Image (cartoon, rainbow, N blue to C red):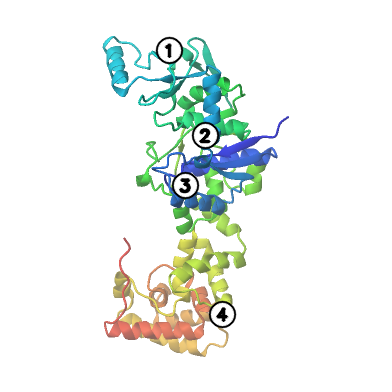
Amino acid sequence: MSVIRTRFAPSPTGHLHIGGARTALFNYLYARRHGGQFVLRIEDSDRERSTDEFTLSILEALSWLGLDYDEGPHYQSRRSAYYAEVIERLLAGGHAYHCICTPEDLEAKRAAAQQQGRVSGYDRTCRDAGHTPQQGRRSVVRLKVPLEGQTLMTDVIRGVIAFENRELDDFVIVRSDGNPMFHLVNVADDIDMGITHILRGEDHITNTPRQMQIFAALGARPPVYGHMPLIVGQDRTRLSKRHGATSVLAYRQAGFLPEATINYLARLGWSHGDQEVFTRQELIELFDPGDINKAAAAWDIEKYSWVNAQHMRGRGLEELTRLVRPQLAERGQGGCEEARLRQAVALVRERARTLVELADQLEPLVANAITYEAKAAEKFLGDKECSLLLGLCERLEVIESWEAPAIDAAFRALCESQAIKLGALAQPARVALTGGTASPGIFELCAVLGRERTIARIREACTAAANGALPLRAPAQ
């Protein structure tokens, strides 16, 4: 059995988005499972729309996802001489021909066909005319498609699909400016690179019969195809930015882990029983394109966030601390000593779904100065509450052991002496210490902040509140 070779062939006309990333992933997994090879090809033959910036962005996204390729990247823009040879082979073998019909001719033919109720494809005027390129006369090259019979494709996801050859016209494979068309370069590259299996979006199904005709004309066996359902939004419409879809690297910036992203992308249209969380190795061992659903997969940012949270909780404390530090550094909070930061991460990690959320939770714990939610400050840092908090500081100053149980006891002793419930003290303390009403347990929070920082922050908050000088944070958008 020959070595399985899959490929990912993006066009660098934009950043790598989730649909393309899933395509790359499935081809990668299939190759890895079968001990094959995964090839990267950059289809940059459209020089007007392709940019180096997008190429680098795609390569960076693949690197972040850990989709390492065995060969490439190959660039179509550097393979013109090879394509010219392939075109000459097709012409010399009688499988293609020069067509001199002008755009005006073609438009007139289409109009006449529509008026007569006929299929408006090219009528093959030049098919047997024997035209050759001549100076001053523009021509395209068309492939000779069989006039009868069927083109059969066995799709590993959808089964056998039959295309009637009579419904295919002699399509253009070389433009009048001499540049080869997508179908030709795509097939020529797949042949030259020995690609045996291709998993791609179902929007390519209509391309397949044309590409299989080129394979046949070149005397090559086509690869095994699998056409995956597209990804849609929760409303089942085509995925777009309004559904939260954006480039893969934007999710890195949003604090998602590469392994969680791989996990979630794999579950978009593929499943293995009821299992939701997978390691990369499990995906490699279990992935089978025959298990890909035919129905469209819905993008769900909440589910993605949940998967990311599971992977974050599976990371060791030391590693998670290392991963979140750059997020804190971007906020000017990267200087926290390692031991305290690690202690803070241990306290809040269960509350966060992404590294950004983790940094949000950590920031009040590691910052030297904090800001306050206006409504929280107004409600919980009035004169009465601040009087209680200053009394709490006196008790906290004298406890022997700065640990959660001793801090708990100091809080409760003050509440008992004032005949108030714990919440009447704990919530003002939480606002004074974090600037908001949500945080981990108040006693554990104090323990992580440390005695000096806890007492200083409470007193500073009370003084600023009394003077109307609390630094307020901007409302969340």
4 or 1: tag closer to the N-terminus? 1
Q: Disc 1 versus disc 2: distance between alpha carbons?
A: 37 Å
Q: Is residue 119 left or right of residue 447?
A: left
Task: Tell me the SS state at disc 3.
Answer: loop
Q: Which residue is mark 2?
A: 200
Q: Along the line of sight, which residue is nearer the eye, 3 or 446? A: 3
Mark nearer the N terminus (2 vs 4): 2
* In-front residue for pair 49/318: 49
Task: Work out whether 330 lies above or below 231.
Answer: below
Q: Name the amino acid, label 2.
A: Arg
Going from the N terminus, do you reach mark 3 or mark 1 first?
Answer: 3
Could you tell me which secondary element the residue under label 1 belongs to? Answer: loop
- Residue 116 lies left or right of residue 46; in this view the side is left
Among the two numbered marks 3 and 2 on one chain, the one whose residue lies closer to the N terminus = 3
- Whether residue 293 is visible: no
Badge number at residue 403: 4
Q: Which tag is nearer the camera, tag 4 or tag 1?
A: 1
Q: Quadrant of the N terminus?
A: top right
Where residue 235 appears, as percent x and y from the top left, is 37, 38
Residue 277 in sight: yes
Residue 467, percent from left and from top? 27, 85
Q: Earlier in the sequence, mark 3 or mark 4?
A: 3
